[in-house]
Amino acid sequence: MRKLRHIPIILLCAMLSLFAACAKENISPAPVSPQPPMGETGVLEFGATSYRGFLLDNVYHSPSDGEIHFNVYIPESYTGIEPYALYFTLPGYEGLYFQGVGGNLRAEGYGFEAQKYNDKMIIVAPRLSDWGITSARQTVALVRYFLSAYNIDTSKVYANGYSGGGETMSQVMGIAPELFTAYLHCSAAWDGDLNVLAQAKTPVYMAIGRNDEYYGSAGLISSYERLVSIYREQGLGDEEIAKLVVLDVKEADYFSEHGISNQHGGGGYFAYDGELMGWLFGQIKE
């Protein structure tokens, strides 16, 4: 067995510092990372630490959209032979890039709860810099990378966005909704192009508190009504429309029953709601 005295002192100090920092943040050094798979374009670098099964601070160097930071959960059972589902979860303010490594995972439960619905699913938790069009384009670039580099079951590609992450994902749905099987929109305004979404007919579930302290609910209700109107103009009936868009406005008692006093922050609880998450992962693209 090689003794520690054979390790250069500078390297030893660096290793000890890393383990100390990881222990403080409840983060573990990751196992030796696999060689990043080759996608259509760009280069991926894996991170060096993990948190509750997620490999942290990975970077996809997109030739068109720059450095895209993200955390990823890849089940140990994944070998690349069998196609796996893919799920993207976009966080609220607490999970933005400047909040630090793993901030999105510590703030929200979506990435962990999703594992209960499908144990053969790769889960990507981007760490974006804002909730505007730049982050939306980076999300699209990252989705396309995973679709090209991993063996993905394209009938099971899911996403959710909470708060600012919902604003971002709504814009993704106005750029490339055809990439997804279904989308769960949580406690957020809708900023994306509804006409593009309606052309793709990607199912969407919109959930928000009636008195959401940050957004209110009127704006999302209006977006829902516009989308329904577009589908009616396409000649779709009520039954077909109900399969494509769901509006779920939660009343005050929904939050109070779960000991939640803030309706906007309470949107994080949607991760634990089997009706919402069950709807999302129950969708399969034909």
Image (spheres, grey):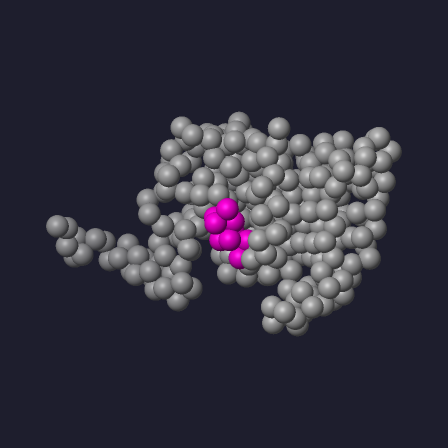
> Which portion, as a residue range, is magenta?
109-117
Q: Quadrant of the C terminus?
A: top right
Query: Of residues 18 and 282, which is closer to you in this image?
Result: 282
Locate residue 253: give its quadrant: bottom right
Residue 133 visible in the current orientation:
no
Which residue of the protein is positioned furthest toward the front in this rendering?
239
Magenta-span inclusion, residue 147: no
The location of residue 146, given as percent across then percent down, is: 52, 35
Q: Is residue 82 left or right of residue 256?
A: left
- Please report the residue visible at 42 percent of the width from the left and 55 percent of the height from the top: 51
Locate residue 163: give its quadrant: bottom right
Q: Is residue 13 left or right of residue 252?
A: left
Q: Is residue 60 left or right of residue 27?
A: right
Q: How many numbered marks, from 0 up?
A: 0
- Please report the residue visible at 85 percent of the width from the left and 40 percent of the height from the top: 229
The location of residue 160, given as percent across then percent down, is: 62, 48
From what the image shows, is residue 110 above or below residue 261? Answer: above
- Please report the residue visible at 37 percent of the width from the left and 39 percent of the height from the top: 77
Residue 117 visible in the current orientation:
yes
Which residue of the protein is positioned furthest toward the left in this rendering?
1
Decide whether the magenta segment is chiefly helix, strand or loop. Answer: helix
- Please report the residue visible at 40 percent of the width from the left and 37 percent of the height from the top: 78
The location of residue 165, given as percent across then percent down, is: 65, 52
The location of residue 111, given as percent across then percent down, is: 52, 51
